[in-house]
Amino acid sequence: MPEPTKKEENEVLAPAPAPPPEEPNKEKEAGTVPVKEPNKEKEAGTAPAKEPNKEKEAGTAPAKEPNKEKEAGTSPGKEWSIGESPAGEEQDKQNANSQLSILFVEKPQGGTVKVGENITFIAKVKAEDLLRKPTVKWFKGKWMDLASKAGKHLQLKETFERHSRVYTFEMQIIKAKENYAGNYRCEVSYKDKFDSCSFDLEVLESTGTTPNIDIRSAFKRSGEGQDDAGELDFSGLLKRREVKPQEEQPEVDVWELLKNAKPSEYEKIAFQYGITDLRGMLRRLKRMRRVEKKSAAFARILDPAYQVDKGGRVRFVVELADPKLEVKWYKNGQEIRPSTKYIFEHKGCERIMFINNCVLTDDSEYYVTAGDEKCSTELFVREPPVMVTKQLEDTKAYCGERVELECEVSEDDANVKWFKNGEEIIPGPKSRYHIRVEGKKHILIIDGATKADSAEYSVMTTGGQSSAKLSVDLKPLKILTPLTDQTVNLGKEICLKCEVSENITGKWTKNGLPVQETDHLKIVHKGRIHKLVIANALVEDEGDYVFTPDAYSVTLPAKVHVVDPPKINLDGLDADNTVTVIAGNKLRLEIPISGEPPPKALWSRADKAIMEGSGRIRSENYPDSTTLVIDIAEKDDSGVYNINLKNEAGEAHASIKIKVVDIPDPPVAPNVTDVGDDWCIMTWDPPLYDGGSPILGYFIERKKKQSSRWMRLNFDLCKETIFEPKKMIEGVAYEVRIFAVNAVGISKPSMPSKPFVPLAVTSPPTLLTVDSVTDTTVTMKWRPPDQIGAAGLDGYVLEYCFEGTDDWIVANTELIEKTKFTITGLPTDSRIYVRVKAVNAAGASEPKYYSQPILVKEIIEAPKIRIPRHLKQTYIRRVGEAINLVIPFQGKPRPELIWTKDGAPIDKNQINIRNSETDTIVFIRKAERSHSGKYDLQVKVEKFVETASIDIRVIDRPGPPQLVKIEDVWGENVALSWTPPRDDGNTAITGYTIQKADKKSMEWFTVIEHYHRTSATITELVIGNEYYFRVFAENMCGLSEDATMTKESAVIAKDGKIYKNPVYEDFDFTEAPMFTQPLVNTYAVAGYNATLNCSVRGNPKPKITWMKNKVVIKDDPRYRMFSNQGVCTLEIRKPSPYDGGTYCCKAVNDLGTVEIECKLEVKGGLSFCRLLLQGVPPNIIDSYLRDLHSSNPEE
């Protein structure tokens, strides 16, 4: 028996991947472990087993049967475990699955057959929705795949009906046997679809003696090469025999051994007692150990397992809690009907079933149902073991002799296995091993023994084994007549003859290959003489012949040489020896040749030899053929190729014409000559090279520019070189390409045409207005068309004509994308008419006219100052910082600017002023406090004047407080007071910092920071020390450079009066949020950061939320929010026109909610055309421009 593997040891208590083939009916649950075999009883019945104390854990009493049961032929035993087999549940699941069939049209149905008869099961699958044949598998039990068991007893067939499109799958069982009974399953799968159906086969017993089968033999396997190969069950089927009385020996309970043994000893026990399906038994053992739930219908359930000898009688008993319940008995899911084999009895609440004349097919799972509950059990049918009564004997023989190894067993026609060096011997029709059985005798016959047969042979039965050694030796061999070399002409007889000292067989080989006897070649063996005769010598008969006597290492060689002139065989070519090949393909032209010795072949073309090698055109020579190889055929390879053969017997010549044809070259890229809203007209030129065959027509394909999927537009060849694709989507870019077709095939596609878009012209531009006028120029601006179309807008064309003429002059030589353009070079005081057109791929739109003539003369524009938002409040800078203010303004002609400070002219030696046409700059390199003041700007254009004011404050650190004095000293506390500093640094004092120093060390330590009042109490001073105090003033620039110190010191006396702190009521600092500084409407320049500021007060500290147009600003990287000491700031990074709108700051605490709003307008930024080119939808741009126009009606 082969040694167990590590994997098998690990899987003893784990779910097995597949059950043993010998018991497909019994193992119905995947992942169960078999139970151990109960103890055998001497009586005819079976003994249900019991495992004590487990009933108490499950909440039920132990199922013990009284002694009265002995009258029925059974005796009480011990129960292994209390548990209900899930076979019934598995059957219910299979029935439920069968109702949800998705592939089966017709399912196989269960059936009944007698022993020796045939039966066929049919399954049909509809193929309407299937692209290929589905996969169908037949199983017996849960896992046994029957495809590998097909043979003389099982055939699988499949057919397909084209009209009805139905696949028919058949499983035919031929000459059924008893062990074929059981549950079968048919599975069909196709891609992600799966369907399954279960059915049962019942095999009716034949009359005659029922043999007994040992339960351990039910787990044995038979070899594949024996007569039973191809049967459904490969278990060790034992031959029927008469039961002979034997001396009673102490029986071994394998189930009890496995139950009490360690897992590492399972394999040893299985080998000792002939159990080959150990994993199957362990699965049963685990299933029988399941704990039974307390039943409401059964007062006493079936025992987990019963055992009976073959031919015996078994008794199943259950006791009902309610005798009115209907009871049904099942075997493998099929209901059992009363018969001579199955007898039912009712005794009060007891329900009894007898099974008479038990056979191997009765070894299965049984369960009984009462109402909605059921209980199950396992029945084991066994046979007595077979013993070896006569052992094998050691034998010696010579090679070629017949060897017989003989043994005797205790039973006639018993199942016996033979082994050679531990490997099972599988006899067969072509095997040298034959087994003959004569009653109890079993003989292993070896015909023509060889040295390889020397080994240790053993025989094994279910109850014992025996072994013996066979030694095979060779006889000495002498060569009486050796083979001789021969040289013959073609067609003559070849006779090779040799003689050896022994009458043995041998093998002939030619060039190392075995020689087979044919009508042309005869092999003769008469006694010690061996001949090889070839009546009519051929070139193929030349070679090295060797005769090798069997079982000897001696060889007799001879050489045969056949001479033949060369010949060229061109029968496979056309009448004119022409070979046609498609360009680009590989041509391998093989020409059969003959001749002996093999002729030398030479290919040539136009007197130029084609050599062997690795070139693109090369020749390859073989003994029986010569080959012309052209790796990648080209059209220049067409021509006549010559073959010359030469050997010592003569020469041969032949010519072959090779013609290379090809698909045509791809046409050039097509031209789209005209485009409509959903059509276009395309033309192209024929390809330069037609591949050697006339062009039959063209295929046209198109695709969207952004897609990679080409769609063919014509399925009939287009004979012309012009085509009109239709049904295109307006505004979508397309490309087209062409395929040329000739008799060889379709060319490669042409290069795609230039992308084109089916378009219609846009609507006219809107809102054409005059932006500015000078003495020689006119600047116009307008809005994009209301309807641009899906293809977009390429640009604009601006035209003008002088009043009184109809000659329109194009102002811009190239298309402009902006909606603003300046017409230059105009004469002063002339009048012109202006119009603008929108242009796209479909052409120019209808023009938009300006309603009246425009006078070319500069217009006076009133001045206007654009004060930046941050300068509308007091502009604060620290001493030493730079001041750089840019104030934009408008006005034509160029305005005159006047700066004053506090009503006086600015000293340009201290303050730099730089002016341009559009802005003025105030620059101070290092600010001083004297630069603080009110700066007035006056912009004047002729009689129009515009003024603006800017407050600049330059701040510095404050001076120290004026006087610090000690008001009172008590206990560990000192009361201080001081007066504010005279110099506040040009800004408000924000707090004070108080420090203390011990008189001994005079090291200063800060005790209070950012203190807002002018009096404070210093606590927790050390008693006995003397302290000085000093105070720093603080504003937004920092602490004062100096501090004011107390003139007197404060002595903390050790003994003093006890100071009682006055009692003050707690002040309620809580208040609802309130904005102390509101948000103001702000203008921002596109591309420059903008901030919104406000201040809020409240206790508890309010939560600040910023919103834009009532939408909360959250997790937006374009916004940054700060809050420092009640000052709330929203920073907008590089705003664009989209960022304009209404901003709201919302403060919330437990006492209330308050909101404040402001409007932000972003000037400048992107034009309409630029926004459109960046992919912004036109409707959004129009909405934005309308909002912008409504907020600035003066523009």
Image: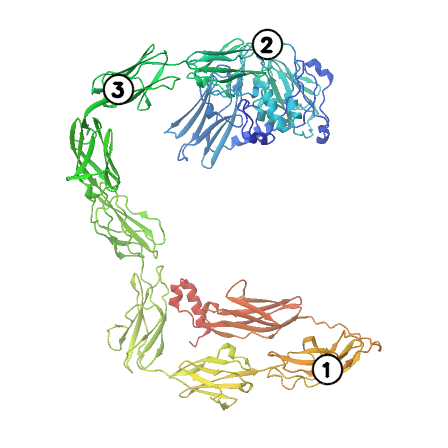
Numbered disc 1: secondary structure: strand
Which residue is rendered at x = 28% and y = 78% of the image?
A: 825
Residue 301 in view = yes
Q: Which residue is mark 2?
A: 243
Look at label 1 and name its amino acid: Ser
Numbered disc 3: secondary structure: loop
Q: Nearer the viewer, residue 1034 or 816?
A: 1034
Q: Nearer the viewer, residue 892 or 1044?
A: 1044
Q: CA distance from mark 3 to mark 1?
A: 140 Å
- Of labels 2 and 1, earlier in sequence is 2
Q: Would you place residue 580 above or below residue 489 in this image? A: below
Look at label 3 and name its amino acid: Asp
Residue 485's tag is: 3
In this view, the residue farthest toward the bottom is: 904
At label 3, counting other C-alpha atoms closer than 10 Å, the crowd grade (few under 14, some 14-19, many 20 or more) is few
At label 2, counting other C-alpha atoms closer than 10 Å, the crowd grade (few under 14, some 14-19, many 20 or more) is few
Residue 34 in view = no
- Of labels 3 and 1, earlier in sequence is 3
Look at label 2 and name its amino acid: Val
Callout 3–callout 1 Cβ contact below 8 Å: no
Residue 977's tag is: 1
Tag nearer the camera, 3 or 1: 3
Q: CA distance from mark 3 to mark 2?
A: 69 Å
Q: CA distance from mark 2 to mark 1?
A: 128 Å
- Of labels 3 and 2, earlier in sequence is 2
